[in-house]
Image (cartoon, grey):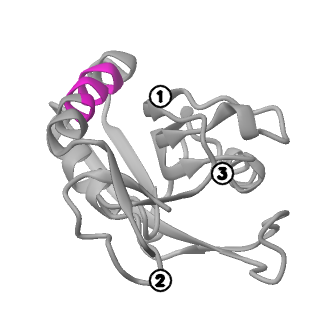
Amino acid sequence: MKEITPVFSAEEIARRVRELGRDIRADAGDAEVFLLAILKGTSCFLADLMRAIEGDVSYGVIDVVRDVADQQIADALEIDFLSYTDIRDRRVYVLKDVVSTGVIENYLLTQLRAHNPAVLRLVALLDRPNARTVDLTADFRAFTIDEDGTWIGYGLEYERRYGNLPYIGRAR
């Protein structure tokens, strides 16, 4: 990687996460909020967001194993509940690092609906709606992006590096 261009500063991220925390609390009312984070790019987002939501908050993590031979299609093959929790009748907010085509998210949300949550919402750190190939809308988003590329920092890694950056940048 030759150059990293910072796009969203640590301060901008912190401000947006606080706003999302307030928005999610308003959506949930007094009910418990259950954050379900898709690993591993949401790790920093999960930690900060759960602290930004007042009242009862709990969380779980999942991993979506996909066919890496065809990244363009990114067929989800398996959902691995790393901390299985019954979501029946709960207000579930699924955290995703970058929502692009929507294929994986659509598949995951379909599978989760079968477990009868009271509410199921998609929360994107970075939302790229112009890249959708399926009918899907993120219910909450920290930032909307228009550009394709490699996004790094704040938990987003490239070749197992750069996830520790306090900002989100674009690699060129």
The residue drawn where x is 48% and y is 42% is: 126
What residue range appears in magenta? Answer: 16-24
Residue 159 is inside the magenta segment: no
Task: Estimate the x, y position of residue 120 in percent, counting from the top left.
Answer: 57, 36
Res 160 quadrant in image: bottom left
Question: What separation in Å lies between label 1 and label 2 (alpha carbons)?
Answer: 28 Å
- Return the residue nearer the eye: 127 or 24: 127
Q: Which residue ends up furthest to the front in the rendered image?
A: 2
Which comes sooner in the sequence, label 1 or label 2?
Answer: 1
Q: Is residue 10 left or right of residue 111?
A: left
Task: Report which residue position mark 2 lands on.
Answer: 159
- Separation of marks 3 and 2 at Cα, in angstroms: 30 Å
- Please indicate whether residue 111 sits to the left or right of residue 5 in the image: right
Which residue carries the number 1 mark? 140
Question: Mark 1 or mark 3, which has the lower sequence index?
Answer: 3
Q: Disc 1 marks which amino acid?
A: Phe
Quarter of the N terminus within the rendering? bottom left
| Disc sitting over residue 112 in the figure | 3
Dot 3 crowding, Cα within 10 Å, few <14, some 14–19, many 20+: some
